Image (cartoon, rainbow, N blue to C red):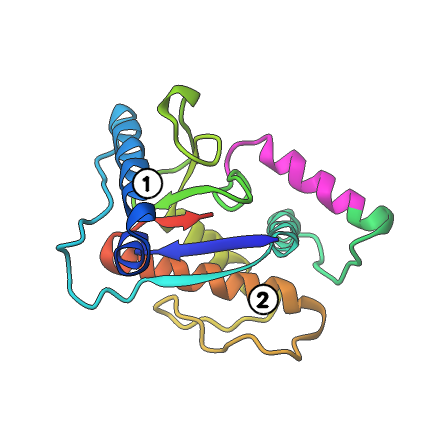
């Protein structure tokens, strides 16, 4: 099992899954209504929007997300970021660091469900925690695409990822990235999703 990431989901559902299309329309309506209650004006662009919408579809194992979050925490604390095996005391300590950071309710990469929910292309400072009654997937945790992108760009140097002045990665992940293969792959997937979402105003959907 792993995380799937979609941008432009309604376009994809319209082509491939009529039943899924109606389900996600309703989900986006609930999201938009909940955001309006928080003073945020956004809704998923309709299907009559720009033709040839590129969107994005990708994903990776859930553990890749944990590994990427670990890099964010260590880099943010000014600590060295090195390799870690997913067993033993060092990994346990890394997971505890991520949990500690989550309790700060500040990081858009960390304060988000692993397997569901949204990032929307609106720049707001802290992750949103919408009420359960709103019925928004991912426990009501909603992140800002702009802030997620900013966090990704901030940890790019720690992963050895080159980024140009416009915020575009100038390299692609490969099978020979050594220590940070998983982290770099997750970084590139999320980075591409951010750029696709910002280009047309779509939400990033975890599912």
Residue 99 belongs to magenta span: yes
| Depth check, front residue: 203 or 102 | 203
| Depth check, front residue: 15 or 109 | 15
Where is residue 135 drawn, in percent x and y?
39, 27
Residue 114 belongs to magenta span: no
Left or right of 2, for residue 132: left
Q: Residue furthest left?
A: 48
Asked which quadrant contains residue 26, the reply is: top left
Element class at badge 2: helix
Q: Residues within 10 Å of mark 2 (few under 14, many from 20)?
A: many
Height in image: 140 above or below 109?
A: above
N-terminal of the pair, mark 1 or mark 2, is 1
Residue bearing mark 1: 23
Q: Which labelled disc corresponds to residue 184? A: 2
Q: Tell me the CA gap for discs 1 and 2.
A: 33 Å
Q: Residue at x 53, y 62 (%)?
A: 187
Asked which quadrant contains residue 28, the reply is: top left
Q: Residue at x 39, y 37 (%)?
A: 125
Element class at badge 1: helix
Height in image: 130 above or below 119?
A: above
Where is residue 129 drawn, in percent x and y?
44, 28
> Closer to the observer: label 1 or label 2?
1
Left or right of 172, for residue 144: left
Q: Which residues are magenta?
A: 92-106
Q: Residues within 10 Å of mark 1 (few under 14, many from 20)?
A: few
Q: Residue at x 41, y 21 (%)?
A: 131
Where is residue 122 drawn, in percent x and y?
29, 44
* Numbered circles on residues, count: 2
């Amino acid at each position: 099992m792993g995380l799937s990431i979609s941008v432009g989901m309604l376009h994809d559902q319209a082509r491939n899954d009529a039943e899924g299309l109606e389900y996600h329309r309703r989900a986006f309506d609930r999201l938009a209504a909940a955001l309006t209650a928080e003073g945020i004006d956004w809704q998923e662009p309709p299907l009559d929007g720009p033709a040839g919408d590129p969107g994005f579809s990708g994903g990776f194992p859930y553990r890749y997300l944990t590994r990427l979050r670990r890099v964010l925490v260590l880099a943010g604390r000014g600590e060295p970021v090195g390799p870690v095996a997913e067993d033993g005391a060092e990994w346990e300590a890394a997971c505890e660091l991520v949990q500690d950071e989550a309790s700060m309710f500040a990081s858009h990469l960390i304060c988000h469900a692993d397997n569901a929910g949204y990032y929307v292309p609106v720049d707001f400072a802290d992750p949103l925690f919408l009420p359960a009654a709103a019925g928004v997937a991912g426990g009501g945790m909603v992140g800002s695409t702009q802030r997620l992108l900013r966090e990704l760009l901030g940890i790019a140097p720690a992963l050895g990822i080159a980024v140009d002045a416009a915020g575009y990665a100038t390299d692609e992940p490969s099978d020979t990235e050594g220590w940070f293969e998983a982290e770099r792959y997750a970084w590139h997937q999320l980075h591409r999703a951010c750029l696709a979402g910002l280009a047309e105003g779509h939400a990033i959907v975890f599912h």
